[in-house]
Image (cartoon, helix red, strand yellow):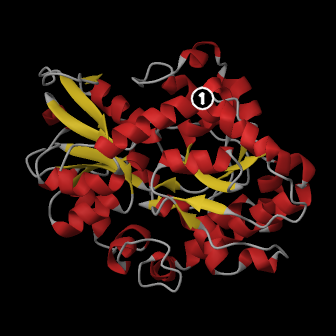
């Protein structure tokens, strides 16, 4: 298997899309697309657990319950495809990695905003059997899903805390104090780890669970155990819909919030609904693999505490959890941490991007606040009744 030929092409496409000039043709296509006053919900997604609330909202008929028309969600193969379909207006609701929305809004100048979080946690750093500590990754290669990902941010936090330097080596192996980062499609990560082409990968579920189930890798650290209740994927929508179809937007967000509440109480059923055996075959994953993420066995936490995959037991983090409110403190801290993070591609706009300003301009929380309040408030999601919090990070 060639290490990431497809991923390299996707990365180049995505890097181009994250510039104003590269996104311009798609933005023009979006503007030229005839506006449909009654356009249905058109979801674009990748087959990962990050998409859960949008898929559950469709599968459980929550969009229709809100009086909306909803087409079957479109499964796409890469983040580049998701972003292209969204910017050009082929789909109107997507989940994106939270740093991708920063690039889309301020790099591409896409008129779109984050309206909610899809989930918290839901990712891990998986490694081969010979790796027992982050320091053991020195001189080795680790795969990331994209430069513009919370995975890259958390991984580099862990590496620096262990005295290692993130690197992007095109020729030659990394030095003993370096860790070479390569972008790789999530579906390629498990086989690459099994073939010893990489020492580890950091990515969304269920690929960490797949590596465990197949016996080719183990969890070295959960990302939610590094950055407490961090967002991974968020819901991104066109500003045109937010401003010109506010009632429609509110109903979309209502359905997604309802789906998160249902998922929290029906985790095994969610795994079955999302699996390749489900009626809609939303993902190519087996129910058992999805259950290990959504409804893990009781004894899993004890095992992870013993190995050090979980170090902050008092946080009581779920492997993946669901709450929709986009805390401003998270967006602000994300922008701060992106600035020193090694990222290939256009990033000049980051230099002058103020974290508080970015949080205000990137996120529109009107709709999710109304939906959460109507659903019983933040306590319905097991959280304090507040729309503010402080970020907690412990590498």
| Residue 8 percent across, percent down from the top left | 35, 37
What is the secondary structure assignment of the residue under circle 1? helix
The residue sitting at 28% across, 24% down in the picture is: 168
Does residue 215 appear in the picture of this structure? yes
**In the image: residue 32, left or right of residue 56:** right
Total labels drawn: 1
Tell me the crowding category of disc 1: few under 14, some 14 to 19, or many 20 or more residues within 10 angstroms, Cα based: some
276 or 84: which is nearer to us?
Answer: 84
Residue 386 is left or right of residue 218, and the answer is: right
The residue indicated by pointer 1 is 22
Residue for point 52% across, 86% down: 279
Relative image position of residue 145 (x, y in whole percent): 38, 44
Regarding residue 232, the answer to whether it shows in the image is: no
Quadrant of residue 250 in the image? bottom right
Q: Nearer the viewer, residue 79 or 263?
A: 79
Image spot of residue 74 (x, y percent): 58, 65
Residue 160 vs residue 326: left or right? Answer: left
- The image position of residue 76, as x and y in percent, is 50, 59
Comparing 79 with 84, the one in front is 84
Residue positioned most to the left: 130
Q: Is residue 182 left or right of residue 364?
A: left
67 or 369, which lies in front? Answer: 67
Q: Is residue 143 above or below residue 336?
A: below
Give the residue drawn at x 20%, y 45%.
2
Q: Is residue 330 above or below residue 273?
A: above
Which quadrant, please, contains the C terminus? top left
């Amino acid at each position: 298997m060639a290490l990431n030929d497809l991923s390299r092409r996707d990365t180049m496409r995505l890097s181009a899309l994250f510039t104003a000039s590269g996104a311009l043709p798609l933005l023009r296509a979006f503007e030229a697309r005839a506006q449909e006053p009654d356009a249905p919900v058109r979801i674009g997604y990748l087959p990962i657990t990050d998409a859960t609330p949008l898929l559950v909202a469709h599968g459980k008929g929550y969009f229709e319950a809100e009086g909306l028309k909803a087409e079957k969600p479109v499964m796409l193969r890469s983040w580049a495809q998701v972003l292209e379909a969204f910017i050009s207006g082929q789909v109107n609701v997507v989940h994106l990695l939270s740093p991708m929305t920063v690039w889309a809004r301020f790099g591409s100048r896409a008129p779109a905003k984050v309206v909610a979080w899809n989930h918290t946690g839901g990712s891990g750093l998986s490694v081969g059997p010979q790796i027992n500590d982050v320091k053991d990754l020195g001189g080795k290669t680790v795969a990331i899903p994209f430069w513009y990902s919370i995975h890259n941010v958390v991984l580099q936090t862990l590496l620096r805390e262990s005295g290692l330097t993130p690197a992007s080596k095109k020729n030659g192996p990394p030095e003993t104090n370096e860790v070479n980062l390569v972008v790789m499609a999530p579906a390629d990560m498990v086989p690459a780890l099994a073939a010893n082409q990489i020492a580890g990968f950091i990515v969304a579920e269920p690929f960490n669970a797949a590596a465990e189930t197949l016996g080719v890798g183990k969890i070295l650290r959960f990302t939610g155990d590094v950055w407490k209740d961090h967002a991974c994927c968020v819901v991104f929508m066109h500003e045109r819909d937010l401003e010109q179809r506010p009632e429609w937007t509110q109903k979309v967000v209502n359905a997604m919030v309802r789906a998160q509440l249902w998922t929290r109480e029906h985790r095994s059923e969610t795994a079955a609904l999302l699996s390749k055996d489900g009626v809609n075959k939303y993902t190519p994953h087996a129910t058992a693999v999805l259950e290990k993420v959504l409804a893990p066995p009781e004894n899993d936490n004890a095992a992870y505490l013993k190995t050090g995959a979980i170090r902050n037991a008092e946080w009581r983090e779920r492997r993946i959890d669901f709450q929709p409110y986009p805390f401003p403190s998270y967006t602000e801290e994300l922008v701060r941490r992106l600035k020193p993070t090694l990222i290939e591609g256009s990033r000049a706009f980051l230099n002058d991007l103020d974290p508080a300003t970015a949080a205000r301009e990137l996120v529109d929380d009107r709709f999710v606040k109304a939906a959460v309040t109507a659903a019983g408030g933040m306590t319905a999601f097991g959280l304090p009744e507040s729309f503010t919090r402080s970020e907690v990070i412990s590498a």
